[in-house]
Image (cartoon, helix red, strand yellow):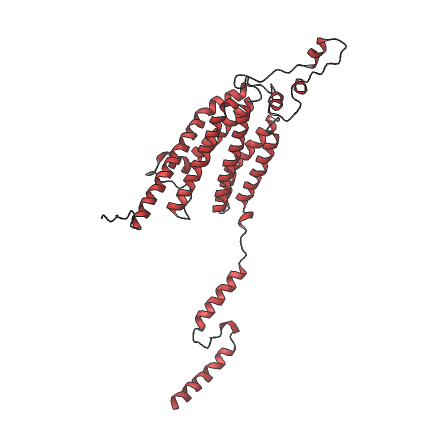
Amino acid sequence: MAGAKNRRQGTAAAAPGLQGQPHEHAPTVNGNGSAHVVEKDERKEEEEEPKENIFLFWPNIIGYSRIVLAIASLYYMPLHPRTCSLLYSISCLLDALDGYAARYFEQSTRFGAVLDMVTDRCTTSCLLVFLSSAFPRWAILFQGLIALDFSSHYMHMFATLAMGGNNTSHKNVDKSRSWILSLYYTNKTVLFIACALNEAFFIALYLLSFSSPLLSPSLLETVPDHAAEAIHRGAQVNSSLLRHLFSNPHSAGALELARANKMDSFWPWVFAGVSFPVMALKQIINVVQLVKASRWLAEGDVAMRKAQGLPRKRKTA
């Protein structure tokens, strides 16, 4: 009885010291007041801190502008080679700028990395689709390049995430796994030159579809107005061969004829010749990337099956 009275007196003596404290710092009845105080303070700090909007990071905004420029280039692609090439080239060059912005503003994100890669794959594929229609005899080659580009990058990124962990970047390639992939992804100069000249080769082919009878023999020479007048003086002659041959101005043949001799082929041939070796090397890197990623995933499957005790030994009768 005396012990209980002393405890009540001790509690009453301690009460005045607690009256001046804020309510959230008061101890709880169950004796875990200090833990509750820490939790409330942490929740209060989290509520006061502004939440970051990943979608509005500067590198991602640059990525969105790349998409807009790429779509605009596709709109002009059928019949406006200069405008299309300019818009497409700016979209590709911004690929280097978003990486610089990510490092400068410390805004490197997984969403940005995926957005960057998906944009690269889609823009290149759209250009190759056009080249398939512009050069039908080489369509299977362009289709193969699209398949190789998509499969190698998808396999590489998936293998990196599955085997290296969620926080591992697809650009972190160890030399022991592949020295050429390590050089390609870790050396920014090599990466920029390889990607830039790879795109330059396909842009050069695109320009040649407007100018080179060697690659596209069906490019025809249109009849100029003065030559049409010489056919029969005084007669109204329609000099548009396009209108005579094709009733639908949006048909494949009409568009091919409309592209005929729209520009000189000298500089496109120069760009194609200079960039071809790098483009070929880029495709070799894609093959290496596909093979290495496949082997890495297979190694992981073997280790996982071994941990699961597979394959199980079958009982013999």
Give the farthest residue toward the front: 317
- Above or below: residue 87 compared with residue 163: above
Tell me which residue sits at (39%, 46%) in the image.
162
Tell me which residue sits at (39%, 42%) in the image.
159
Residue 185 image-quadrant placement: top left
Residue 283 image-quadrant placement: top left
Give the farthest residue toward the left: 317
Comparing 84 with 40, the one in front is 84
Comparing 130 with 317, the one in front is 317
Is 222 placed left or right of 304 in the picture? Answer: right
Whether residue 22 is visible: no
Is 301 placed left or right of 257 in the picture? Answer: left
The tally of labels here is: 0
Comparing 119 with 99, the one in front is 119
Tell me which residue sits at (47%, 46%) in the image.
110
Is 223 placed left or right of 119 in the picture? Answer: right
Whether residue 144 is visible: yes
Tell me which residue sits at (52%, 64%) in the image.
44
Residue 307 % position (x, y): 30, 50
